[in-house]
Amino acid sequence: MKKLIFAQSLLLALLFSSCTNPADVPIPGFPQGGFLSQTYPLSAQSKAKLEGVYLLESGADMFGDRVVMKWAGDYLSVFTGKSVGYFVLKGGLLDSVVFLEGYWRYQNSTETGLAQMIVPRDEGGRYVVGDTARTGTLRIRGNFGSGNGVPDQPVVFRYERPITPSLLTKKFQIIAHRAGGRTSDHIPASENTVELIKITERFGSTGIEIDVRLTKDKVPVLYHDGGLNLRLTQKGPMVGPVEDYTLAELKSFVWLINGERIPTLEEALDAVVTQTNLKFVWLDTKTEQSGVITAYVPIAQKALQKAASMGRELEICAGIPTQEVLDEFLAYPNYQSVPSLCELTPENVRTVNARVWGPRWTMGTQNDQVRAFQAEGRRAFTWTMDDPRFIEQYIREGAFDGILTNYPMAVAYQYYIQ
Amino acid sequence: MVFSPTIQWLLPTNTTYNNMKRTIALLAAIGLSLVSVYAQPSDSSPASATSDTLYSLTAYVSGGYVHNVSEFTISPAGLSKSGLGGALRIMWKPEHLLRMGVEIARTHVYTVKQEGLQTAFGKTDVNITLNATPWLLVFSMSPLDNVDVYVGGGGAFETTSSEAFGSTASTGSLSGAAMAAVSYMRPLSDKWSLGGEAKWLYMDKYDDMVVSVQVMVSFKFLEY
Amino acid sequence: MVHSKPLCKAGAVLSICSMLIVHSAAAQTLGTTPGTLHYPLSITPKQFKTEFAVSFSRIPEDVVEEAASIRWPLFTLEAHYGLPENFILNGRINTLIITNHLLLGGKWVYSPHERLHLSVGYDLAYWFGKLKQFGFNNTAHGWINYPNLTVGYDFGKVALSVKAEANIVTAVTSYADDIEVSTNKNFFNGGSFTFYIEQPLWKNTTVSLAYRANFLKFYYPEWLLFPTINQFYFIPELEVGFRL
């Protein structure tokens, strides 16, 4: 009898141990920086030679038949057509061999792992690092793995062709939702943060959408939800709406899920201007409290001036998602000169002189209306598209100038593979 | 199509597997409980199964010490997990073993208090208190004389009172709540009892868990 | 990412309470189980048993949108109909208004011992949900299969049942306005373990208290919030039911 009670107690002890729910998806990393720490940086010309469309000679079951490779600063992004998969790699060279190291991930699951590749000397390495013409086939050979495990599964990319030049000159916007995706997508940084803004281009983004609210002392900050909650923040003493707290309180006592602080709009736009090459910012206005537009327009204008002084190409548009925001926007002095993106009717778009019309994607491609706006010098972005099938359809058959998405890597693949 | 997800589900690749293990452990624990109960000598006395046909309503008032047992990933400076709490519970006792009732309580969850905290916004005194007002549907049974076991579920309104940087805030949020408790009540008379209770309360919105030890007084105010 | 300790601890606490309860009701004479619903007891042919229940679950942190500030419980109406040869036909309606789950199934009951009963069953459910948000109609529907096994022990005044249930989705389709957004077919969605404690409350009215541990990818009551990451989530539920 005592043994039974003891056994019960042991089993109950098991039950009291941690009962966690979501798994983290940390970015796998090579110990001590991997092999790249022993290489030299790649030049801009070398990087450009690596961009293009590649066929998979090995690894197609994981990454599809073709991939697109494109640089975002020092990071080479590889966009695949399978399971919203992508690689983020850094490069270096040594002895006419190009080394690429980083990680891969399926964005719609928790599967990820390390990746390590080379461009062999005789399969394009000399061409990439030198000024010689390309002879023979450019191949990238390597391995990928699971988690932090040693990459041991082969993957081979064979260069097929460059990215169609018109796609690069056409200003199609791949706009990342909440600056790069949702916190629940297990992205490396929390949604609506400076930390995510700094890395979003690696996912294929050319622009971002961010959610703006006012604190109690009328400071615009980035935060999506109506209240502080465990979806976005770590456990803390403050509950209830963001609007009930001052900036100082939020900055001092609230941590986002991945340890960041809630950023001000000013901090976020400064990061966009000074630390990225993003071309477009869509300010989604959350209005549990009036005065948001009045508060953030001057901040946006200041950021635009700074961008102009740096020679940076950048647009920042005030989002008009609802009638309430429209009414507030119309009350703003000289509203027609404030760049805006209107999600409402075509008539509303013209009333506010919006630069961009933003219909939701479920309304269809609406090519006639989109082209009518384009003839007026406006553009049209659709939102929020995450299904690769629809992304492909809208890119092939639609006339939109941009897509807002939680999966910029999926849009990047479908767009650049054309 | 089903096979590989089945294998994936069974393999220990994520924490859901741990949760499964826990549940299987629970099943085994209950199984052992069944065996241990079955192994006991049976008491076939019909008297113990006789229903008491008097119904009653009893009010329980409790108050005492509350301690927060939640997990904090980042523990704020000046965190105080101890406080006070109290509850009012009305229990209906019909003729069988199970009782049903309602409870409303007020409990301290935790406080962050610090003087002269240095921040990027300057120095400030901080006093942030999180309290909760749960309201629950409660069930109880009595495994031993004068001992009652309670379980309950419902909601809670969690409120923050905040003073920092010269600003005060008082705001709140609704949450789900669950409770379990064990009490010992010694009868003082036909209607009055005095005793104590150990209680566990969970509120899911912010993953708050508190345990409390409270003095309890009960009064049987209606019998029919 | 924060690691939390959700209602699994509630389950542990409830298991202690259930053990105390069953110990308290141990070795009593038989009598409770005819009033139960979930306990795997055969029903006299052509007789009905019905129950009304409410349940509450914890939303995983991995959701894509904020949950509503006021969350309603899931309401359930369940009925069992006695058939010959220890078969039972069972039906259930679960509703949260924006999500609805209609289930029909059958089970066969076997008793190796006067206090021990078990049943093997199979249920098929159709669920559908609808909510207008972000300016357009979100709708979804699907078919879900639940093969199940229940073991129950009659303590006399209290009946304890444990139900193990697999969850196999035949198809789940979601729509935004008229556009089919996604369809997922023929996948193993996980399963659930439910622990029922049933006993009379007053006169012949039986109450069931249940703790359900769900291990699911797709959890229909939270279909609007649910993340797109393809993994299993632990979703605990507490349920209270009253025999009608």
Image (cartoon, grey):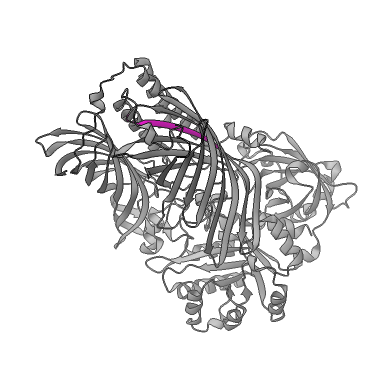
Judging depth in this view, the residue of C224 and A62 nearest the camera is C224
Q: Residue furthest right?
A: A135
Q: Residue at x 53, y 67 (%)?
A: A284
Q: Residue at x 71, y 47 (%)?
A: A91
Q: Position of residue A113 (x, y in %)?
A: 65, 40
Tell me where residue A119 sits by quadrant.
top right
Which region of the structure is painted magenta? C157-166
Report the side of C26 relative to A131 (left or right). left
Vertical relation: A350 (above or below) A127: below
Tell me where residue A399 sits by quadrant.
bottom right
Determine if the magenta segment contains residue C161.
yes
Vertical relation: B177 (above or below) B121: above
Vertical relation: C61 (above or below) A308: above
Vertical relation: B93 (above or below) A409: above
Determine if the magenta segment contains residue A86.
no
Q: Quadrant of the C terminus of chain A?
A: bottom right
Q: Residue furthest left?
A: B189
Q: Position of residue B187 (x, y in %)?
A: 13, 34
Q: Position of residue C125 (x, y in %)?
A: 56, 46
